[in-house]
Amino acid sequence: MPARGRPFQKGQSGNPAGRAKGSRTRVAQAMELILSDDADVIMRKATTLAKDGDPTALRLCLDRLMPVRKDRPVPFALPPIETAADLTKATGALLAAVAAAELTPSEAAELGKLVDAHVRASR
């Protein structure tokens, strides 16, 4: 029998699928309802404050207009990988692109992960 206050065994959940994707918490729903009537007024005030030089309001407006880019396409021609010998060509091309400032080290690392995944999938 499970302990009081613990209706499920350790490692098991009453909802293994978890919360539905896109579902909102009650607090978020309540805040959305409260702000829905005044959203236009609030946005006008925020833009007015931003125009007057308020750095916080300016940041909020910019974050909405131009959110931080999470990822971008990387124009890079990776040599084809058909044999194990091609791996050194591919990693050499990544290193050369970083050295030539064509790729950032983090971009090369992400592409390296793709090369690694390709190698594992082809085994």
Image: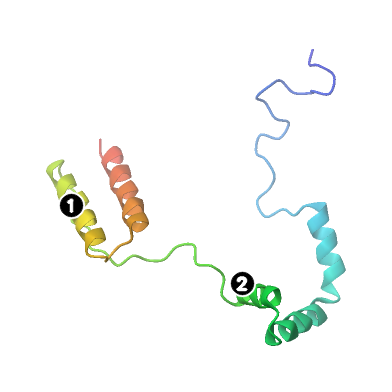
Q: Which residue is located at x 30 percent, y 43 percent?
A: 116
Foreground of the two, 85 or 64: 64
Q: Which amino acid lies under the numbered mark 1 shown in the image of this protein?
A: Gly
User: Does 77 sit above or below residue 6?
Assistant: below
The total number of labels drawn is 2
Task: Answer whether labels 2 and 1 touch (C-beta < 8 Å).
Answer: no
Foreground of the two, 78 or 46: 46
Separation of residues labelled 2 and 1 (CA atoms): 38 Å
Residue 90 vs residue 121: left or right? left
Q: Mark 2 sits on what residue?
A: 63
Q: Which amino acid lies under the numbered mark 2 shown in the image of this protein?
A: Asp
In the rendered image, the quadrant that contains the N terminus is top right
Q: Would you identify the image quadrant in which residue 19 lies?
A: top right
Residue 65 vs residue 114: left or right? right
**Whole-percent x and y of residue 35?**
83, 70
Tell me the number on the disc at residue 37: none
Q: Would you identify the image quadrant in which residue 55 lies?
A: bottom right
Q: Mark 1 sits on what residue?
A: 92
Q: Tag 2, which secondary structure?
A: helix
Q: Which residue is located at x 29 percent, y 38 percent?
A: 120
